[in-house]
Image (cartoon, rainbow, N blue to C red):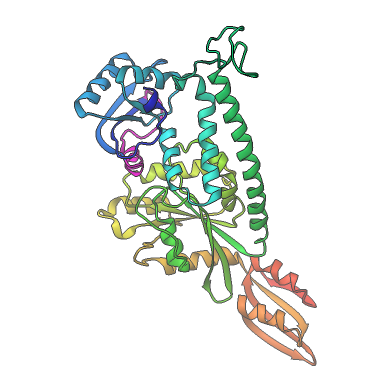
């Protein structure tokens, strides 16, 4: 088992998926998402094993009898790995592997493995490595079988063993060495990421003069495709989970005078490992600092309701629970039955139905975004010097001029505009500004 336990990838391996639902708990009963995750990691799914439990078995999670049945399936399907749709304790993994005689992965370990294969930039690689080490550290005691006592060069573990200087004495457990090395590496990664995160946060805060929109959503909902459709960003967009881990920001002008910074983020999944949420916190700051969130939803997915709930849970966890959100029902072109979509549209009347792939509904999305950008409409009267072209240019670009009066070197304009543009207008310091309506 030593070799298989230390190889945490499931590439090109035959996998049996296991899903256990404890009575009284909420959750999805099928293994569709775990299947997609396993295939994204490179596994060939050969069998699925589902079980309802009265309570979690402390030793094997699913109980002794079911574990023996699982061992029989491993032999029958010649499986190389078993993947649980649950988070297991180190002791449970160890006991399961004793019986089934193949590698056992839990949900978090699988997702961390996928993130490791997707990371491209230095920041993403460091974030994933940190998440993996933080997942591994508390499990060192029970996951590995090589934690024997390390002795001096003389061989024996006794205090009088003969060896080179610095190697004699009672020896040190491999567990203690591993923990020290892992702890040291975690500290190094945190310090390195802290510097990157500070630069990232300064970059985000430097955009405060722009209206910022962040695209969020379940993984593979079409976020990158939508970013490409709106901005010609050229971002990688593939039909696979976690195709991109790095946030990309592009300038978007949905209408004349409306300039927006549009960013996408890493995709969410149900029960996203806590270590990943913590490691990617700076990346997710895009959502925390956004003026508006575009929640992209794959309406063609049979698990659409659960996916919406999962994204809302992650948003609440990172501090975005009270942010303005515009829901975007994507992949309308892939819908085979309109009934479920009509029900969703009834439950979410403010949502926009689009197809980022074909362009369907993008005009309506632009109109709704512009409405959020402008806010409640007001009419302002601006009195300013005729020679001050900046104020006049701003008013004509961001509003509708209703009336213009010229007196000597003074111009008075009545303009209908969005309330949210008032601070930007005030920064231009017109001679007189008053709200006449709204």
Q: Residue at 26%, 20% (x, y): give it.
A: 71
Against 57, is 279 above or below? below
Against 316, is 103 above or below? above
The image quadrant of residue 12 is top left
Res 399 visible: no
Residue 111 sits inside the magenta stretch: no
Image quadrant where one finds the C terminus: bottom right
Against 157, is 342 above or below? below
Against 110, is 155 above or below? above
Q: Nearer the viewer, residue 219 or 101?
A: 101
Residue 37 sits inside the magenta stretch: yes
Q: Is 197 situated left or right of 87 in this image?
A: right
Q: Farthest residue in the left direction?
A: 76
Q: Farthest residue in the bottom direction?
A: 408
Q: Is 80 situated left or right of 166 in this image?
A: left
Boundaries of the magenta span: 22-42
Q: Is 186 situated left or right of 95 in this image?
A: right
Image quadrant where one finds the N terminus: top left
Q: Position of residue 64 (x, y in %)?
A: 32, 14
Q: Nearer the viewer, residue 32 or 187?
A: 187
The image quadrant of residue 365 is bottom left
Q: Residue at 38%, 62% (x, y): give it.
A: 354
Q: Position of residue 2 (x, y in %)?
A: 39, 23
Res 127 visible: yes
Q: Nearer the viewer, residue 249 or 165?
A: 165
Q: Residue at 60%, 57% (x, y): give it.
A: 291
Q: Position of residue 297 (x, y in %)?
A: 41, 52
Q: Position of residue 302 (x, y in %)?
A: 31, 45
């Amino acid at each position: 088992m030593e070799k298989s336990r230390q190889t945490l990838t499931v590439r090109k391996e035959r996998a049996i998926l296991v899903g256990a639902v404890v009575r009284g708990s909420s959750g999805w009963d099928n293994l569709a998402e775990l299947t997609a995750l396993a295939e994204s990691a490179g596994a060939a799914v050969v069998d699925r094993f589902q079980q309802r439990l009265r309570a979690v078995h402390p030793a094997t999670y699913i109980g002794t009898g079911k574990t023996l049945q699982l061992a029989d399936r491993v032999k029958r399907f010649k499986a190389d790995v078993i993947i649980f749709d649950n988070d297991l304790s180190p002791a449970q993994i160890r006991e399961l592997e004793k019986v089934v005689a193949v590698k056992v992965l839990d949900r978090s370990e699988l997702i961390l493995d996928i993130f490791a294969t997707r990371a491209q930039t230095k920041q993403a690689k460091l974030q994933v490595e940190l998440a993996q080490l933080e997942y591994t550290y508390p499990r060192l005691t029970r996951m590995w079988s090589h934690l024997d006592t390390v002795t001096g060069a003389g061989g024996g573990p006794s205090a009088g063993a003969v060896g080179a200087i610095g190697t004699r004495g009672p020896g040190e457990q491999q567990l203690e060495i591993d923990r020290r090395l892992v702890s040291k590496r975690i500290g190094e990664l945190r310090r390195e990421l802290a510097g990157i995160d500070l630069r990232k946060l300064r970059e985000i805060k430097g955009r405060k003069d722009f209206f910022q929109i962040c695209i969020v959503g379940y993984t593979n909902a079409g976020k990158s495709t939508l970013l490409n459709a709106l901005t010609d960003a050229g971002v990688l967009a593939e039909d696979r989970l976690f195709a991109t881990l790095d946030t990309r920001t592009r300038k978007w002008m949905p209408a004349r005078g409306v300039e927006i910074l549009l960013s996408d983020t890493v995709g969410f999944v149900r029960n996203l490992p806590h270590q990943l949420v913590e490691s990617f916190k700076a990346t997710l700051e895009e959502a925390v600092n956004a003026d508006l969130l575009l929640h992209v939803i794959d309406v063609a997915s049979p698990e659409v309701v659960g996916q919406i709930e999962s994204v809302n849970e992650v948003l609440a966890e990172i501090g975005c629970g009270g942010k303005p959100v515009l829901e975007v029902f994507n992949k309308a072109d892939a819908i085979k039955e309109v009934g479920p979509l009509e029900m969703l549209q009834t439950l979410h009347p403010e949502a926009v139905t689009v197809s980022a792939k074909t362009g369907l509904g993008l005009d309506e999305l632009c109109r709704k975004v512009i409405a959020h950008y402008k806010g409640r409409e007001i009419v302002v009267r601006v009195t300013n010097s005729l020679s001050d072209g900046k104020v006049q240019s701003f008013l004509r670009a961001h509003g509708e001029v209703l009336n213009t009066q010229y007196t000597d070197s003074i111009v008075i304009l009545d303009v209908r505009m969005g309330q949210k543009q008032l601070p930007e207008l005030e920064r231009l310091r017109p001679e007189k500004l008053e709200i006449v309506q709204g």
